RNA sequence: AGGGGAAUAGUACAGUGGUAGUGCGGCGGUCUCCAAAACCGUAAACGGGGGUUCGAGCCCCUCUUCCCCUG
């Protein structure tokens, strides 16, 4: 069997401090950073996505940042493909990939080499189901799924139209049950010699930092950034405009709510988002929790701990190349 | 000081004398192609003390607090 290649994952809830730490880690370990972030892939979206600045990179190579126009679609499958390409390149350079970002689903897709059975665009069927859901109600679609894939239907709540549609689509395209497929995929082990770090902090502190960061974003000109995107022709239905901070400010710019209301929603929804991220990471196997409190918020101590763990799990020493 | 009104969950509000509800927030969870998305679940309250009544969040008295009006 082929030897597993090394992969370092550095994740955690939004505003936990991943970005800063990732640079230091990359330098210590001889790594390059791949962003596992569904919004930082987009150009022209710097402030709201808390994107790292060129001058903050400290010479460390970054991948999957600023690679798409906001009008372009993006999803796990695209991410997985691009991420694999980037990793090959990094291995070829004799360096180590460091997956950094808060999108747990994306990390999972790469780490467990999830099979999404790529198939040609079938938006027609999707659109048809969406229209059907609107007309007949969510229960109607769920009933369809009940007949096609009972197990999936039992597992998915009728109101969760997105996943009901995906399950139906999967059945139509492959003739197989997504419930069975998922079960198989779930049993996979990490495809890499990986160290999976989750950076986290006291909930109260995290929430405070989130609120402060949103205020900072506004001070830096988030509204202007979104206004420019709007002027470029960005609309609500684009994947990029579903990002936190973007959909709310867009709504404000369309006169649908006050700025105060928009800011309130950004803060609230970002807090909720951070909570969902934590829930996700709690479920992931083999994660190494890095509680900042336990290290007295000392980055040096955190780094030492991480290097130690990396040596244990991947066999990589701490010597930079 | 006098007159009037209000007091119900963290908050904003419901609640014929008969099992105290709703939204938002909080907390927990699901997730294998829109995931910064979508979805689900849960805890939590009648200001204090008397009285009337089989039974009081609701009626009466009183205390406390808050709001409005008038000197």
Image (cartoon, helix red, strand yellow):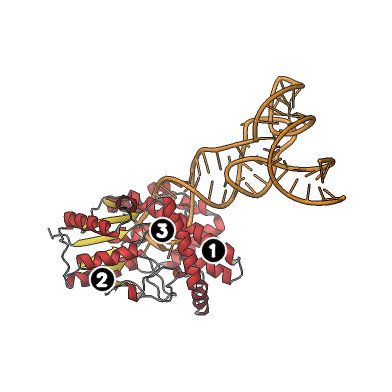
- Which residue in the protein does label 1 denote? A263
Residue A113 image offset from top left, x and y in percent: 26, 60
User: Of discs 3 and 2, which sits in the foreground?
Assistant: 2
The outermost residue toward the left is A1
Query: Depth check: A273 or A241 in front?
Result: A273
| Image position of A292 (left or right of A146) | left
- Residue A224's disc is none
Please give the chain letter of the residue carrying mark 2: A
Residue B59 image offset from top left, x and y in percent: 78, 32
Crowding near the residue tagged with mark 1, few <14, some 14–19, many ≥20 C-alpha atoms within 10 Å = some
The picture quadrant where one finds residue A1 is: bottom left
- Which residue in the protein does label 2 denote? A86
- Residue A166's disc is 3
> Cα distance, mark 1 to mark 2?
36 Å
User: Of discs 1 and 2, which sits in the foreground?
Assistant: 1
Judged from the image, the secondary structure of the residue bearing numbered disc 2 is helix
């Amino acid at each position: 069997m082929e030897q597993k290649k090394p992969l370092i994952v550095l994740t955690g809830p939004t505003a936990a401090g991943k970005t800063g730490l990732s640079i230091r880690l990359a330098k210590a370990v001889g790594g390059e950073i791949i962003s596992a972030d569904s919004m930082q892939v987009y150009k022209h979206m710097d402030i709201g996505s808390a994107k790292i600045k060129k001058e903050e990179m400290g010479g460390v190579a970054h991948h999957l940042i600023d690679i798409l126009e906001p009008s372009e679609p993006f999803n796990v499958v695209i991410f997985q493909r691009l991420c694999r390409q980037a990793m090959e390149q990094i291995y070829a350079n004799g360096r180590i990939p460091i997956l950094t970002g808060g999108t747990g689903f994306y990390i999972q897709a790469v780490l467990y080499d999830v099979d999404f059975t790529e198939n040609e665009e079938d938006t027609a069927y999707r659109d048809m189901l969406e229209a059907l859901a609107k007309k007949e109600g969510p229960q109607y679609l769920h009933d369809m799924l009940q007949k096609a894939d009972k197990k999936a239907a039992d597992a998915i709540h009728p109101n969760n139209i997105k996943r009901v549609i995906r399950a139906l689509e999967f059945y139509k395209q492959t003739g197989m049950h997504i419930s069975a497929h998922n079960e198989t995929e779930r049993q996979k082990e990490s495809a890499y010699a990986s160290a999976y770090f989750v950076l986290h902090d006291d909930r109260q502190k995290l929430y405070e930092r989130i609120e402060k960061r949103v205020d900072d974003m506004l001070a830096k000109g988030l509204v202007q950034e979104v206004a420019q995107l709007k002027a470029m022709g960005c609309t609500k239905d684009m994947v990029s405009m579903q990002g936190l901070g973007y959909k709310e400010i867009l709504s404000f710019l369309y006169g649908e709510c006050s700025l105060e209301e928009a800011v309130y929603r950004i803060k609230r929804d970002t807090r909720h988002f951070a909570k969902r991220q934590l829930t996700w990471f709690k479920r992931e196997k083999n994660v190494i929790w890095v509680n900042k409190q336990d290290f007295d918020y000392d980055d040096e101590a955190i780094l030492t701990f991480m290097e130690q763990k990396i040596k244990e799990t991947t066999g990589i020493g701490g010597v930079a190349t």
